[in-house]
């Protein structure tokens, strides 16, 4: 992923008001290892149900505000992230709703999907199984996983950007 500045991040958000964008906390950009990310994702420490994703869509950064559904304590089951396709304990995957961009979002329309609760899919796809004859080259595996993650993020973004029917 190409690095992003604070201004580029704020300017990229497609589904929030100017006031919401101005109050948006940013992660430590100077600590970010950009080469090991497909997107920049973080949670708001002051509002734990709020999260953000920003990634490069071609030559343009696109950012979205997400909201995690509140979770009732329950049975411990596994869950599946729709972006990185990693199966994890249920408490590590959250249902996020994302307001649609433009008038559709202002009218209350949202899109939802299950995503890793910490928005760290880029890290998870880099955790590789032990080498074996059955596993392809680890570097190729990361490239394939990263391409799939970006393809699914692109599809999700298309839904956020699509006007309401």
Image (cartoon, rainbow, N blue to C red):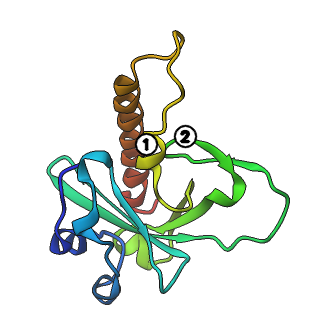
Q: Earlier in the sequence, mark 1 or mark 2?
A: 2
Residue under the image location 55 percent in, 46 percent down: 82
Where 110 sits versus 116, above or below?
A: below
Where 141 sits versus 165, above or below?
A: above
Q: Is 152 on the left or on the right of 37, as rendered? A: right
Query: Residue 3: image x %, image y %?
Result: 18, 57
Q: Is 140 on the left or on the right of 67, as rendered? A: left
Query: Residue 50: image x %, image y %?
Result: 49, 76
> What kind of element bears circle 1?
helix
Query: Residue 17: image x %, image y %?
Result: 33, 83
| Residue 85 - label | 2
- 164 and 123: which one is in front? 123
Marks 1 and 2, how far apart at CA: 10 Å
Residue under the image location 17 percent in, 56 percent down: 60
Residue under the image location 44 percent in, 63 percent down: 164
> How many numbered discs?
2
Query: Residue 91: image x %, image y %?
Result: 69, 60
Where 155 sits versus 30, above or below?
A: above
Q: Tell us which disc is closer to us: 1 or 2.
A: 2
Residue under the image location 21 percent in, 59 percent down: 61
**Residue where numbered disc 1 is placed:** 152
How many C-alpha atoms fall within 10 Å of the one at disc 1: few (<14), some, or many (≥20)? some
Q: Is 44 on the left or on the right of 12, as rendered? A: right
Q: Is 3 on the left or on the right of 89, as rendered? A: left
> What kind of element bears circle 2?
loop
How many C-alpha atoms fall within 10 Å of the one at disc 2: few (<14), some, or many (≥20)? some
**Contact between labelled residues 2 and 1, with CB atoms less than 8 Å apart:** yes
Where 154 sits versus 22, above or below?
A: above
């Amino acid at each position: 992923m190409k690095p992003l500045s604070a201004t580029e991040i704020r300017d990229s958000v497609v589904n929030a008001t100017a006031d919401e964008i101005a109050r948006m906390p940013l992660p430590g950009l100077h600590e970010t290892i950009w080469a090991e990310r497909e997107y920049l994702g973080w949670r708001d420490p002051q509002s734990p149900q709020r999260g953000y994703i920003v990634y490069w869509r071609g030559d343009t950064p696109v950012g979205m505000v997400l909201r995690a559904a509140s979770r009732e304590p329950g049975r411990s089951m596994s869950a599946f992230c729709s972006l990185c396709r990693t199966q994890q304990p249920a408490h590590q995957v959250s249902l996020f709703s994302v307001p649609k961009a433009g008038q559709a979002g202002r009218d209350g329309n949202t899109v939802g999907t299950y995503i890793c609760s910490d928005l760290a899919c880029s890290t998870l796809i880099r955790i590789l199984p032990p080498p074996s004859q059955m596993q392809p080259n680890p570097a190729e595996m990361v490239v394939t996983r990263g391409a799939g993650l970006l393809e699914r993020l692109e599809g999700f973004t298309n839904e956020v950007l699509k006007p309401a029917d």
